[in-house]
Image (spheres, coloured by chain):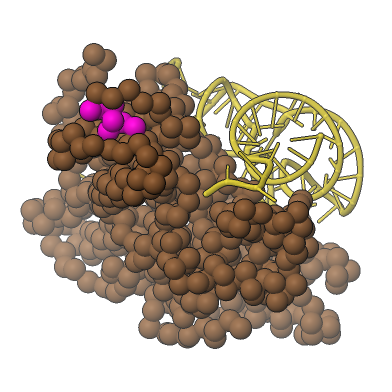
Amino acid sequence: MSKPRIESPETSNSSGNLKERVAALLTQATKRYLDSRGAPPDTAFEIHLDLPRNTDHGDWAANVALRLAKPLKTKPIEIAQGICNQVEANDLIETPEAAAPGFINIRLAASAGGETIESILTGAEAWGRSDTFTGQRALIEFVSANPTGPLHIGHGRNAIVGDCIARIYAAAGYEVEREYYFNDAGVQMRNLGLSLRARYLEACGREVEFPEGGYPGDYIITIAEKLKGEIGEVKVSEADEALEADLQYFNDYAAGINTGEIRAGLDALGIAFDHYFSESSLHDSGKVERVLDRLANAGATYEEDGALWLRTTDHGDEKDRVLRKSDGNTTYLTPDIAYHEDKFARGYDRLVNVLGADHHSYVVRLKAAVRALEHDAEKLHFVLIQMVRVSEGGEEQRLGKRKGGYTTLGELIEELGADIVRFFYLTRSPGSQMVFDLDLARARTMDNPYWYIQYAHARCCSLLAKAEATRSAWRETTAVDATLLGAPEEKAVIFALGRLPGVVVDCAQADDPLGLVSYLRELATTFHSYFSAGNRDATLRIIREGEGELTQARLTLIIALRQTIANGLRILGLTPIDRLESRSAETDTTDGND
RNA sequence: GCGCCUGUAGCUCAGCUGGAUAGAGCGCACGCCUCCGAAGCGUGAGGUCGCAGGUUCGAAUCCUGCCAGGCGCGCCA
């Protein structure tokens, strides 16, 4: 049962999301058109608004008429014309035009531009947020790396994408919680303890064989040295019965340090979790056993070869999966099922799991288990994060935790700063493999899209400061005479501003922040273009001496623009910059080649 | 062998719930600062959307089969 949507006329959604309002107008018109020609009342249609490439085609184009041509057995252009005729008088859009082969082209009315700016200024920090998903709760599980070592650049991508999805969900109205899951009961943690034990003994001058499946990275040696510095050379028993107790000690010590580093890294990125959920708690509380019972009662399991199997093939898997091995231990899958049983019991409307693409086979398995438990698997979304490589000086390095040396997330943040790291991770779709271009990320030049967007924001600040400093009289207001903003460049800016709430909702539905990043780049381009138009044509300059009302209107537009860029950046977790440092300060080329 | 992801301009990538001449950034070639920051803007060259079929009024987008790259295929996690 989905909860009813809460209608709240005070949020920016109802007043600010032009796209939704235009779609509503067309929906009404289409219904009236269908009625007028006696079509069956259940005739299905959908209003889909596209951004046309060609500005002659207006601000939006709808293709309903083309889609209705077949069911109505009518020429699409006739349907388009019919729908256009049914659009009721309004102050939002100009009269729509039917265009061959059957598009409906929509152009915003000039007054809608004024409305957009007013929505932004009255919305202020809330502009861009909407109530589309208000009343719904979402749980975003991400990172979930075990504390067996520092976070690497792959985890970084997961962390940033997960956090941004959470932020975008929140902006689209969801009540969001972030969760980090630890597999702290498995062999990975045991291997960590064994690894530290070996390194500690080495540090004490003993010759030991490094454990199979252990973690060879240098960071374990560092931890071992730290440990030795604290406790000195303590006798470590080699007797089997003593090993487990020792191991627990080494394990806890290493996990403690690694966890601290992981949290510090996430903290540096501005990522905070609402819950840290541990696998061992599922065992302790009996939830693992309970979910096995539930699955058995549902008839989804069977015994074979001394093991307990789950019939995942009933739900599209290629083979059934073992839940409990013949040695009596559960597989890693079982506590994960219990974990998701727990998530569903907590009553979320949407569950998002952000995980590495190398775990994709897990998706079918887990969804099968969720279905077997009779939960709505549609609520469970997976975002698969593809591999990250780093390129520097034209060379690529491939990174793997088990191979030892690699770039950690911490090193990346230290060198570039949290915001640039965050931004660069977002410039590719999560499902595409990405090459993190270190040279470009370092560059404080026009090539770097991060600075390009920040420059647009800084330029707005600079203009407003200039207006303050000169005698151009203007006042902060939420009202604007949009008829003064009729230049094509101005209309382009206004229209672009109005898209923010819709972009955010689209990103939420796609579980992909890239659309918002692209939007901000386009918005920056639109503004830079407008600004530069003033260089060609002085009448388009924003601050015009002696033209108070015009300057007033243009500066109000700039305030709305600054607000929109700032809000877009903040939704992504980035901090808008008011003033860019002069470039000459860092012209000396630093070479890190020695 | 099977499954998932990817293949779009020289390079890195958008677009892929089908729509009007296929986009951006970088690189390349030109042009624009007595003037609100040129960290910018404008113009141009550059593409058989991996290949071959199919569905459709219409396919980069959907379906099928190939080809290439990545990842994963355990009573490991």
Instruction: Answer left or right for B30 relative to A132.
Output: left
Q: How many marks?
A: 0
Residue A38 sits in quarter: bottom right
Q: Quadrant of the N terminus of chain A?
A: bottom right
Asked if the stretch drawn in magenta spans residue A233, the answer is: no
Judge whether B46 appears above or below B34 on screen: above
Residue A75 lies, in percent from the top left, at 84, 64
Q: Quadrant of the C terminus of chain A?
A: top left
Residue at 65% across / 80% down in the picture?
Answer: A28
Q: Nearer the viewer, residue A404 or A115?
A: A404
Judge whether A214 appears above or below A173 on screen: above
Instruction: Answer left or right for A81 relative to A349.
Output: right
Asked if the stretch drawn in magenta spans residue A202, the answer is: yes
- The chain whose colour is brown is A
Residue at 51% across / 37% down in the picture?
Answer: A387
- The chain whose colour is yellow is B
Judge whether A93 appears above or below A569 on screen: below
Residue A191 lies, in percent from the top left, at 43, 41
What is the span of residues highlighted in magenta in the rendered image?
A198-204
Q: Nearer the viewer, residue A93 or A296?
A: A296
Q: Determine if residue A289 is in view.
A: yes
Residue B59 sits in quarter: top right
Residue A541 lies, in percent from the top left, at 26, 48
Residue at 31% across / 59% down in the picture?
Answer: A272
Secondary structure that dominates the magenta span: helix
Residue A307 lies, in percent from the top left, at 70, 57
Q: Nearer the viewer, residue B9 or A248?
A: A248
Instruction: Answer left or right for A58 relative to A102.
Output: left
Q: Determine if residue A117 is in view.
A: no
Residue at 32% across / 45% down in the picture?
Answer: A246
